[in-house]
Image (cartoon, rainbow, N blue to C red):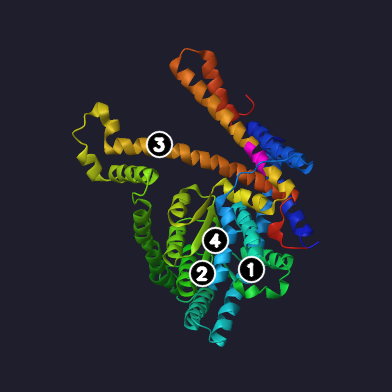
Amino acid sequence: MQWFDRSRAWFGVILLLVCGGVVIFTELVKSGRNLHIREIAGLKAIEEAVGRATEMGRPCLFVPGLQDMNEIPTVAGISVLSHVARIAAEYDATIEVPTSRSLVMTAARETVQAAYFSAGRADAYSDDRIYYVTEEQFPYVAYLTGYMVREKPAACFYAGTFFAESLILAETGNSIGAIQIAGTSEASQLPFFVAACDYTLIGEELFAASAYLSHEPHQLGSLKGQDAGKLLAAVLLAAGSLIATAAALMPNSHALAMALHFLKDNLLGKGGPG
Amino acid sequence: MKSNIPWLIAAVTGCTMIVAWFVPVAKDWRDEAGTWYEILAAIAFVLGGANLFTQHLQKISARRAGWGYSAVTLVAFVGTLVVGLLKVGVIPDDPNYPWSGYHQEEGSALWWLFYYVYNPLTAAMFALLAFYVASAAFRAFRVKNAEATLLLSTAFIVLLGRTYAGAWLTSPVPDEYSALTFPGLTAIILGVFNTAGQRAIMIGIALGVAATSLKVLLGVDRSYLGSD
């Protein structure tokens, strides 16, 4: 009986370093240490977008993507929804959330209701604006684009996981003149959102949204922890590039070949502790 | 209490998944957690269907704008459900068991609906993407500043490099300078610059997922759970 998979030992070490970094920085911030967090234009623009929708008397559309609540980008998207809903409640704007998963609908209802409650507008909340459409990709897109063309929302938010539908949604939103803010963890869809939306949260910015918007110290610490992870990745990248280049220039060096093997097959591969 | 119990379930299940990744004997726990999620998702599916039904029924009964679309949706929903549940047009595998036979068997009503109604409709929706790509490219590639010019030039090379015309136009270039042909330049752009950029974004995303997962497990971020 194997109690520990040794081939994943280094992965465990890296995971502990990244998670440890997040926990340490969270504790540091909680103890009062100041942090500089760069501005994220897409998140700053949320208030402007909701304000514009309020002035125009049109709804805000929030699309939480195609995946279910077991996917972290959807959880990150729902955290953004919490903030958008709170501003919408404060401004008395209408927010529409069509979902492609029933569990996302349930989570979105709880989140929006909580946001209305915290804004002191519990009476203005209605379940009818957050509903299930379909789990199928293109029927969902057909509904959303139809809704956009008919109701002409003044602000469209896309936060979660998107695939081929990203450009159809963003272009339709662009054609009706809506201010659009998008965020996705799908790197292949980012160019489409960048081309058609006013603001795009690129990759990690979607995951930083919750911490950035909440301004809670214990959440902001996690962003610095991510930076520590990036530093580790950069060090590994630089070391890997240097060792690989040196190994290519000196093919007879056994030490360099071993170092490269250790880096590729043990540290970043499945070769175990070596 | 309302957010504590869901958080506790999420934390215990998440920790189980992490432990099962490193400890092979705990693999069964991971499968068990996956099964529970499937059960929950199946129940939620019924919830979604019920929500769809009530929402459109309300729209029709109130004669709200667009109620005709709701009627079409409900007819399609109920029709597909009935046809699938009753296995209309399915020839039984065993004559002694009239309900035997695969519900999506070729020639059945559900199969017909899938191939002759659903498939063409989704294909048409997907095909629209070509026009959206064209309109987005037209806007993105307009030469407004240095960055847009660079984008346009790169797109021009990649588009040409992916077609026969690109290879034909640079065919006189000797083989030792093949990197300077349109297909060669395309390979460099996609393999070096594009991959480097994509990997940087992917590293950021992976770290973001790890940090968000940790916040969910520790209960630091509960905004997705609503209020207590």
Q: Under tag 1, what secondary structure?
A: helix
Secondary structure mostly seen in magenta is helix
Question: Chain letter of disc 4?
Answer: A
Q: Which residue is mark 2?
A: A153
Q: Position of residue A102 (x, y in %)?
A: 61, 66
Q: Which residue is mark 4?
A: A157
Three-letter amino acid code at disc 3?
Gly
What segment carries the magenta color?
A: A223-227
| Horizontal side, residue B123 vs residue A49: left or right | left
Q: Under tag 2, what secondary structure?
A: loop
Q: Earlier in the sequence, mark 1 or mark 4?
A: 1
- Between circles 4 and 3, the one closer to the viewer is 4
Q: Which residue is mark 1?
A: A91
Q: Are marks 1 and 4 on the same chain?
A: yes
Three-letter amino acid code at disc 4?
Phe
Mark 4 and mark 3: Cα distance apart in space: 32 Å
Q: Position of residue A50 (x, y in %)?
A: 58, 64
Q: Which quadrant of the rendered structure holds the N terminus of chain A?
A: top right
Q: Position of residue B156 (x, y in %)?
A: 30, 45
Question: Chain letter of disc 3?
Answer: B
Q: Under tag 3, what secondary structure?
A: helix
- Between circles 3 and 1, the one closer to the viewer is 1
Three-letter amino acid code at disc 1?
Tyr
Residue at 35%, 59% (x, y): give it. B135
Q: Which residue is mark 3?
A: B191
Dot 1: few (<14), some (14–19), or many (≥20) neighbours within 10 Å? some
